[in-house]
Image (tube, rainbow, N blue to C red):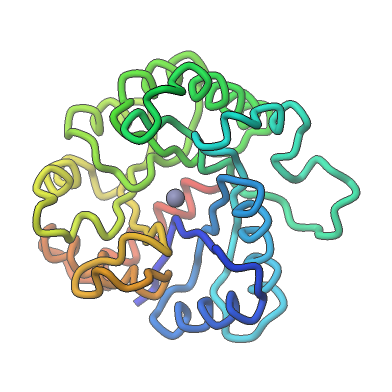
Amino acid sequence: MRLYDTHCHFETASPVEIAAILSRARAAGVEAVMAVGGSPALNAAAELAAEVAASGEGMPKVCFATGFDRDQVRDSCLVARGSLGGADESRTTNHEPRAIGEIGLDYHYSPETREAQRELFGAQLEEAAKRSLPVIIHTREADDDTLALLREVPSRGVIHCYTGTPEAAKAFLDLGFYISFSGIVTFRLADNVRAAAAVVPDDRILIETDSPFLAPVPLRGKVNEPAFVSHTCEFLAARRGVKPDDFAALTFANAERAFA
Ligand SMILES: [Zn+2]
């Protein structure tokens, strides 16, 4: 099995702990990982994961994304300072972010900051377009505004941890986006997420862990990690009537195109 975890976070700054997580992933068939930022700490950890993977043995290939998520609205001058990575010559690494993320809107947890979220999201979409980078988008109870901004600032990339309606999924697909499913799709009460996955064609579907949260069934409740993406792969392969190996291969190829 050749798996690509298209979305995980590292909440530790310890290279030893990161190396252990990555080694377990490789042993589980995960050959590529997108380490995703969202805050200054997560951005730094994502970049560190790429460095750890590049310098270690028996590691998956790790790319990273940097961005400022909806919770960073109080520090939105971060974008103006160009601190999305790759632009600061004082940095010691020669790695460049492969994507801008995660960015986006969450009106479920933070409805009171809608306007500031839209501003921060829009600024980062423009930054990504300027740098010709794909974006990794979080959208929760905000699909209309997310779609409106994506129509304003033509963008490419991934709608991650999809939990919206099949109709909104079709609208994102029409804009050229890939749609990624986390372990939520395996949860007993997630019929709506399974209905959305059913409308995503084979050439646009991705799988992710969004670790350290949202461990898939049968590991639900544990601390999630990239190795566990195999369970989401097997679950969706069964739903689609294909072999897990084949579904792993097609989602791997999709991820490489999405982040090219
Ligand atoms: Zn995430």
- The correct choice, above or below, for 1 with respect to 73 in the image is below
Q: Which residue is nearer to you in this view: 237 or 78?
A: 78
Residue 237: give x, y in percent of width and height.
18, 64
For residue 220, side relative to residue 253 (left or right): left
Quadrant hosting residue 110 = top left
* Quarter of image, res 130: top right
Q: Tell me where residue 4 appears, x and y as whole percent.
A: 42, 64
Residue plotted at (37% across, 71% down):
223
Q: Is residue 63 above or below residue 114?
A: below
The one nearer the camera, 112 or 222, is 112
Quick check: 100 above or below 110? below
Query: How far across and down, in percent of the image, does residue 139 sit?
Result: 37, 34
Rendering coords of residue 225 (x, y %): 42, 71
Position of the N terminus by quadrant: bottom left
Query: In the drawing, does residue 259 fall left or right of residue 123?
Result: left
Residue drawn at (25%, 50%) of the image = 202
User: Looking at the image, which residue sits at the far right?
Assistant: 90
Task: Give whichever of 172, 211 is nearer the camera.
Answer: 211
Q: How many badges with numbers are in the image?
A: 0
Q: Residue at x 57, y 29 (%)?
A: 73
Of residues 13 and 230, which is closer to you in this image?
A: 13
The residue positioned 13% from the left and 50% from the top of the image is 190
19 to 205, vertically: above or below: below
Horizontal relation, residue 97 to residue 224: left or right:
right
